[in-house]
Every structure is written in structure tokens, then in C-alpha cells.
Image (cartoon, rainbow, N blue to C red):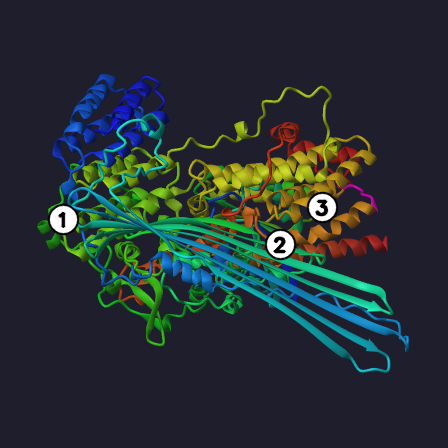
Amino acid sequence: MSKEIDISIRYLDNVLSSNNANLILNSTAALLESISKHCDTTNYELKRCIISLLRIIDKKCFFNENVDLNQIKYSLKELGSLCPKHPKSTQSYATPKIIEVDSDSEANPEEENIDNLLNQLNLKKVPCFSPSFPAIDDESDDENGVTTKQKEEERAEQHGQKVCEEEVVKLPDGREIRMKKTKTVNVKQTTKHVTISTKSANMPEVSRQFMNTKRGFDEDEESEDTNFGSPLRTDPFERFKLMLQDKEESSDSDASNPGSSSKTKTIERNSEVSQKVSEKKERDGKLLAEHEASKLDKSNLFAKQIDTFQGNTLIDRKGEGSYEESTLIKSDQPQQSQVATPPRMHVVEYMMMFGDDNKNNENEYLKGTTISSYVRLNSNLRTHEEQFRKKIQFEFSTAGTSSTTIDLDNLSDLLNQTDFNCLRPPQKWLEDVPHSSNNQQPKAIDWQRESIDKHRIHKEKDLLLEDDAREYIIFREKNGKALEVRGGPRDALIVYATQPGHSTLLYQEAFLITFRTFINVLELVNKLIKRFIYMSMSTDAQSESKARHTFSVIVRIIDEVTHYELDRDLITSITSFVYRLIHEGNFTFSRILRTRLLERLREPFDVEQFLSTNLAKPKKPQDLFDFKSADIACQLTFIDSQLYHKIESAELLWWSQEQNENRSRNLVNFTEQFNKLSFWVRTQIIIQSSQKDRERYMMKFIKVMKHLREMCNFNSYLAILSAIMSTPLARLEWDKKIKDALKDHTGIMDTAQSYKNYRALLQTAKPPCVPYIGIILQDLTFVHAGNPDTIPADRCNNKKNILNYLKRWNQFAILDSIRKLKKWNYDIKRNDIIIQFFNGFQNRIDEEKTWELSHLIKPSNRKSKA
Amino acid sequence: MREFKVVVLGSGGVGKSALTVQFVSSTFIEKYDPTIEDFYRKEIEVDGQPSVLEILDTAGTEQFSSMRDLYIKNGQGFVVVYSITSQQTFHDIRNMKEQIVRVKGTENVPILLVGNKCDLSHQRQVRTEEGLALAESWSCPFTECSAKNNQNVNVTFAEIVREMNYVQNRSRQSKSCCSIQ
């Protein structure tokens, strides 16, 4: 029996007294993990014991209730004695679930493999880099002069690839056969182009070209080594590894039944493409101009895939890895925008959209006017995502929880054509029962004890348990082809989100971001759990796949659940579902769910603490001029981006419907920072007693503002701008120098034409970027106010409560850009000295006082009302 | 054609956005896209004279107190909205006239006071007389309307146009008076 369980039991026992909920929950998770590895979790006694342990621990840690610690200790003791009695059974694979290709799933598992990934990556070409240099003026008309223009291009490519395959076959007598193959391929190619054209007054232009190419290819022999019966330690990440290292080297408890084998394939691939282009122009040997630009693209893939076979049948496939890509562009023309032109489709998408061959047509983006600025912003963000650096972690498995990327083309197309003429009505009209949720709060359900009678349920009509929701949904139609969801009854929309074979990635993402506009999390989770339980009662492959997909939607919802929503009821529903999963022997799913839940249980963010420092008071009082403008801008950006990343899209969505500060805590923190900064800046300027000092401060803030704009921090940028343009300051007399310096900025705040100027600025921003959230809130508010929640009954067969999904598409378009921007972050280190100087922006006077000072400096010519 | 910039002010939740949406699109429209440039523009004919209103509605951004100044600066006429179902929202706007006057630097500002949500009369917390009294102290017109039922909405915006016309004419007159003297 593994010592690991012993250790984790003892560890948990020890931390119990600490009363630290986080610690207890994490060590419980570790215990569950080791049990799942070494014990037969299908044993009834063991399951019962685990569930009762979790019940008390959850009561203590999630709900902060007083529990009898001895009860926990007793459970632990029982667990300690039960575990060794039920080691992981070698029979557990006796009835393997053969994962079949779902007939209703478009993602073909055959394609979800690592070879496909590699092939697609190999097909990816770095586009030819051709910056355009400004034309070199040749003004002199010297008849005898000889002008030489030289253009040089140097391109080097280097790709290395190492594929390692390891196969382990377990024989009936317990021996193992291992085979290992390694293949390394290196490809090198360099080309050099030189074009020289010479021109003199009475000679036609002559061009000479040189080209020099070197190619290298080297593939080393396949090294193969086979060995019999050697034990192998796996699990390099196991936390108890050190404690166990000297023990039980040979007890391999993972022995499988005869005929099973596993294949592990790892791929390491790196590639480097460097391109350099230069141009030179000379006249009579005298250099007129020279330009040079270079670009370096690097990518690095590390991926691993494990296939488990039963005989010749693939029963499981799992994969994971990371991919890193970076692009470095150097140019003496800083304003060049065309260098940002990315490859049309990048590898991330290949990875995430296995088997999806839809090419994106970039030009499509710019069509259309609807939510156009966001669609354009989104596409701009995508462009930049391909520049600089990106790193992604990915995983795929036959369990079907994979990440997704959005196809924006569909979205802009979708928002453009909204006329009712091309709607496809559902095959069946179903009226949603009026939502009782408005006056009646949904309640927690104890899913472990809830009984679902499959036969009874089947008689009632429950959309939630339907196999396929498509026949209830209204689609938009184009040339007889169903396009995207336009509306439908609530439950049909929920079920449709669990049908990845039919609904698009775009739909699922939009559902996850906007469902809060028609159902609350608790109610939704309860509905999905019900569907999952119902589906997992049948053992056919179809139902199993439906249960699995439903489960992955539950996981995604938990992943993005907000602190506000995680109340007692929701936690009760989720944890009791965890117990039920354990009870049903689905230990893997129960652990996934529990882990995700723990990750969301973070303490709320404390802004005051974040803005305070531990530094001792500085000896001499500091002022603004002790710091460089760029450094101040950096620290403001550091603060903003930290606060910005805390905002959840749910908070924005809620805000557009009802302004509740408790629900949208992080959003309120962010807006408060904006206001604080603005009033702090006003204060700094207006409390200066001399005109000279006020101008000095003003100038300093203009400089800071300029840096902020360059860093694309529009939040602080506008906060400072709003201070400088505020009437108490703007009405005073300012030096021409200051007025000139402000000229570039004042237009940005023009509210005309729905903030046309600001929107244009944001659209061209290079991420990382912190947007001004006010306009986003305003847009969401108007999308909410202007679009009905349901489609009018006279347009859908007199059925009421048919949800208007177009409204959700609009909301999604706005919120998705927020999410995209959140993927980026600044590489700024916190500078405590400056943060301390900010002093939480507390040194500020209120609006009234600002006006008073302003009138003191320059008396009002308006007659007082009194 | 005359063009006016109108700013809609008031606390969150008083139905400003509904009022604006109702006005800029009086018929049933499938979609509302606030990001397009002319979303907030509308032509209106008042007393036989057509003009264009560009509406700046601060709905959603009420929390940005530091921006209010800029909104006011950008406006020529002001529609100040409260909800008749909430005393708090009425209280919030009590100093609004003073704020507007201070930013604009003149007493001559076209303002209209609007009590919204008059369809919810059973939840009324602010009596019509209270609204009237405040309007009187501001010496500005007053209406009650319902954005939800499209009741008095166009009347409201027509009123602010009249007010802007009136104030403009008056200041022109007073200027010409001054130059004569």
C-alpha cells in the first residue's frame, strides 16, 4: 500500500488544528488525489467514507460552521484503515469504456492528435517580410552624377524537430516491454538577395542581382531501444515524491490487465526565421540614405500525447503541451504599421480548432457597421496577438473539455444581417413557462440525495432532457442554410450550448458570457446537473457523450463564477453534486469539479491594501518632480492593469441592467481609481500658490499623459485629461506652451458622434492596453435598453418568452473585447517608492473646494445668485 | 439646419437610456447599435422649424463623477432626469442646476426637468408638485413622462429645443441691447 496516502492523511490531520480553511481544503484535495491513484474508488465502503469526510470538511471550510474536529479525525482514521484494503483493482480496466466517435460530433477524434498538430505547424509559413522604406529623394539634377541603389535581403530559416515515441506493453505475466524511438530532423536554409541598380543621367537604369542560397537537411538515424520488464517511475510532479523516493521502488500499482498498452509521444519543435532587409542609396560614392529593418520569428512547441490501447482499440487519448511564439521587429521607421501584418491564421487556432478548416477571411472584418467598433477592435487585437510574444498551454483529451477560439467573421456577419425575412422558424414551437425566478429565488439542491426517476421524468415534457434542442430554436438562414441562433426558449438555448457537435464555438462562448441576462448561475447549474445525471443514467455512447459535454459546460461556468455568486446555495449544489459523483464512482469528474471550485474561492481583492506599502516614511517629503514622468506613467499603468484584470464580464453585464455596487465590486474599484486619480491631479495643480508652479505641475502631468497614451493606458490617460480639462482648471489662464501641448489630446474627449475620436484611437491600440471602461458601460447600457429581451410574440407564432439572442450577440461582441484585452499584461515591476508617493491618492480635495480655489485665483465674473 | 447638443443627466436607474432610445428610434427597430456614429442623432421639428439633436446620454457612466464636468461642457441644453418612484434620485439632482451654471459660466442655460417612470404611479415617491417646485426655483420647464410607454417622450425633447431657442434668442437680444447702450 502506498505510503503516500498515509502521509496525506497525517498532513491533513495536522493542519486541521490550524483552522486555515485554504490549507485544509488543499490538503484534502491532495488526499483525494493520492486515493484516486492508489485505491479502488469504486468500493462502496471507501466511497461512503470519503463522502462523509468531505461533508464535514466542506461544512467547516466553505460555510464556516462549527464542526466537531474529532469527527473529521475519526473519518481520517477510518479512511486510513480502509484504503489499504482496497488497492486499485487490476480488474478496473476489465470493462473499459470504448470511446467511440460520436456520430453527432463534428470534431473527429482522429484529427485531434499530435501528428496533425505538427503537420499543421509545419505548414505554417512565416510571411516574407518586406517593409517599405520611405522614398529617398534625389533632388540634385547633376547630369554627370551616378546614383547607386542597393537593396539587400537576407533570410535564414532554421527548424529543429525531435519526436520521441515510447510504447509500453504490459504482458499478462506482469512484465513490460518498452520501446523507444527518437527521430531528429534539422532543416536550415539561408538565402541572400542583393539588387544593385545604377543610374546616371544619360544612361538607362541597370540592375544587377545576386542570389545565394544554402540549404541543409539532416535527419539522424532512428535510435531504437527495447527493453524488458524494467520498472519505471513516473509522476515527476508528485509532491510527495521526495518522501517516497527510497521506498517501494518496485511496486507498480498501475498494472493493467493483459493486452493493454500505452503509447507516449513527445514532440519538441523549435523554429527560427530571421529576415533582414536593407536599402542604401549612394550618389557618386556618397551615402544619401540608408534604411534597415529586421524581423525575427521564433516558435517553440512542446507537446505530449498519451494513447491507451486495449488490444488494438484506442480507449483513451490525452494530450497537453505548450506553445510559444514570439516576433521581434526592428526597424528604423517606428511608425511602420504594415510590419504588423500577421500570418493569416496562426497555430493557436490550429491547436484549438482541430479539424476545423474554415479559413478566416480578414477582409470580412471591416465590412458592416454593427457594433462595428468592437468587431474592429477585436480584429485589431487579434492582429497584435500575433505579434510580440505569446505563450499558450493547451490540453486535449477524449473527455472533451477543450478551449476555443472565436471566429469573429461569423460574429460581424451575424450582427449585420438581422432582418426577419431570413429567419428559420423552429420545427416545434414550445412556450417557455413564465420564469418564476423573478420573484422566487432559486434554491440549492442536495444532489446527492435528490432522486431522479428516469421513467417518471420521461413522461413530463422537459426540454432540458431532450436529446437535441435544435428543433425548438429559431435560426437565421442564408441561402437555405441555417446560420446562427436568433432566439429560442430558455431551456432550449441551454441544451444547445451542451451540443458542441451542432452549436458553434461562437455560440457556446456567447452563451457562457451572456447567460446571466436570462438565468442566474445557481438555476443554470442545477439545470445542467439534472441533465448530466439524467444522461449518465443511460449507458449508450450517445448519452454518455451528452453527459460529458454537459459536464464540460458546468466546469466552464464554475471557472468563471464570480465571488458574489458563490453563495451558500451555489456551493451546496456543487459540493453535493461532487458527493454524488463520488457515490457513482466517477472519481475523476468529482475531483475536476472540486478543484475548479477551490480555485474560485479567493478572498475579495482589497484595493487599499494593494495601494499601501511597507516602506518607512521617506526622510524628506517627496514631490512629483522627484520622479520621471515615464516612471509615474508606468506605476499608474501597473495599478490600472491589476484592477482591470480583476473585473469579470458578468460585472459589466450586471451593471448595464442594475447598478449594484456589491455585485460589481471590482468594476466599482476600477471606476473609483479613475475618479481618485482625476481629483488627485486637479488637487496637485490647483493647490500650488504661484502661477509658475501651477504651470510646472500642469506640464508634468501632460508629460505623464503622453506616456500613458503611448502605453495604451486609456484609463489613466483620460482620468488625467479629464482633470486638466475640468472647468475649474480650464477656466484659468495658461501659458501658450501648455495650450499647445494639450492640442493633441483635447479632441480625444470629444463626445460628438458617439466618441468617434476615442473609438478610433482605441481601435488602433496595440495591446497590452487598458481601455476607458465608461464607454463600454454606456454601450452595454444602451444595448440593454434598446433591444428587447424576448422576440415579440407576434413574430413567433404568438409564443411568449422566446429569448432574443441577437441582443446577446451584441453584448457578447462588446464583452469579448474586454476578455481579449485581459489576456494581455504589461511587464511592469511594482515600484514601492512611487506607490508610496501616490499615498492611495488620498491627498485630494473635493469638487467644491477645487472650485473655491479656482475662484480665488480668478474671480468669477458671473453675478452671484444671492 | 440648426444643430443642438443635448446632455441627459441624472442618477443611475432613472431610465435615461430608455428615454433616449425611445426618442432616437420611435418605431420598432430590430437592433440598436450605440457604437455607430449617428446613433444618438435625430432630427426633430419644433414649431415648424426643423433642427438636429445630438444627444449625449451619460447612462451607465454615472459613477464617473470626474467626467461629469466634461459632459456638461460639451452640452448646449440639459435634460435633467429623476425617477418619480425614487426620492433618492430626486435628491441627487437637487444641485444639478448650480453645477451646470458653474461649468457653463452663465445663468442662461437651457434646462428641462423631467420626472420619468410616470407609468409606475402606484410606486410614486416624488409628487408632481415637488417636481414643479424645483423647476420653478430653477426657472425652467418641467414634464413627467414614461419612456416605457412612450408617453410624453417627444414632447420632452421638443421642450428642450424650445428652451434652447428661447435662451439663444434672449442672449442675442440682450447682446444687441448692450451694444446699443
* Residue marked by disc 2: A751
* Residue marked by disc 3: B106
Amino acid at the residue labelled 1: Thr
Residue for point 14% across, 29% down: A85
Q: Nearer the viewer, residue A333 or A327?
A: A327
The chain ID associated with circle 1 is: A
Q: Nearer the viewer, residue A482 or A144?
A: A144
The chain ID associated with circle 3 is: B
What's the magenta region? A732-736
* Residue marked by disc 1: A95
Disc marking residue A831: none
Left or right side of A229 for A408: right
Examine the rendering and report whether any part of residue A160 can be seen. Answer: yes
Amino acid at the residue labelled 2: Thr
Dots 2, 3 in contact, CB < 8 A = no
Marks 2 and 1, the one that precedes in the sequence = 1
Kindly state the secondary structure of the residue where label 1 is placed.
loop
Q: CA distance from mark 2 to mark 1?
A: 67 Å
- Position in image of residue B78 (x %, y %): 60, 50
